[in-house]
Image (cartoon, rainbow, N blue to C red):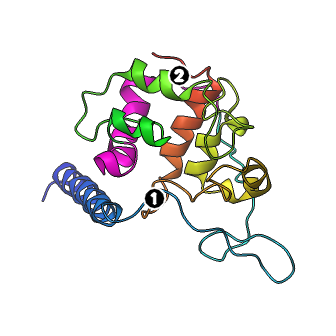
Amino acid sequence: MPAGHLRSTLLAFAAMHRFLARVAAAACLSTAACTSSSPASKSDGGITDAGGEACVEYESDADLTSPTVSFGSEVVPIMNFSCGIAGATCHGTPEVVAQQRPFLGLFDGGTDAGQVIAGIVGIKSQEDPSMNLVSASDPTHSFLMHKVDWDECTLVSQCAATKTQYTNCGQGMPYSSEELPQSDRDTIRRWIAQGAKNN
């Protein structure tokens, strides 16, 4: 088998595996809400995440200045496939806004990028209203970034102080799935750091 054909076959297999894993996660989503129970407290008073791991803030060493990230062609596909896959169960239809969850794109594409941006950039998080979902040019103070980095557990005291229904900051996203690959998370982080533009 020619090396180029083998590489194409392996890439297709990997893509299919990721797709099937996400479809399985979507099946779980259809019966679950998009928040979790409170993180467990360790006996020493420290906070752990849902998996029992010590809760630490994620620190990225990615270059956030280049390459330039396009929201429409790079970030929207990540959101469509990862956040919109379960439709109304989490973030995949505009109707979720009435349930105090941001609309992040349709699984099958066709998402109006401007509609997604209008619903997340400069908009207060329902789980932690001291922070915007996306603060343009500031991924560290963007609640969405904490959710996809799975370190929202570091913000529990802020979420509890708000006295909303989200006293524990929920859980990492995508819900009931593996965390996004670091390259996808860094694409989102880079887009935010570059001003969270509709480009």
**Residue range corresponding to the magenta coloring:** 64-91
Residue 20 visible, this angle: yes
Residue 109, located in which quarter of the rendered image?
top left
| Identity of the residue drawn at 35% across and 61% down | 29
| Residue 159 rendering spot, x and y as whole percentages | 72, 51
Hey, what amino acid is under mark 1? Tyr
Q: Position of residue 130 (x, y in %)?
A: 75, 37
Instruction: Report helix, strand or loop for mark 1.
Output: loop
Q: Is residue 78 above or below residue 110?
A: below
Q: Quadrant of the N terminus?
A: bottom left
Residue 137: numbered disc: none
Whether residue 71 appears in magenta in the rendering, the answer is: yes
Q: Are marks 1 and 2 in contact (CB under 8 Å)?
A: no
Is disc 1 surrounded by few (<14), some (14 to 19) or many (20+) residues within 10 Å? Answer: many
Percent coordinates x, y for residue 3 in the rendering: 21, 54
Q: Is residue 14 left or right of residue 103?
A: left
According to the picture, the residue beneath numbered tag 2 turns out to be: 68
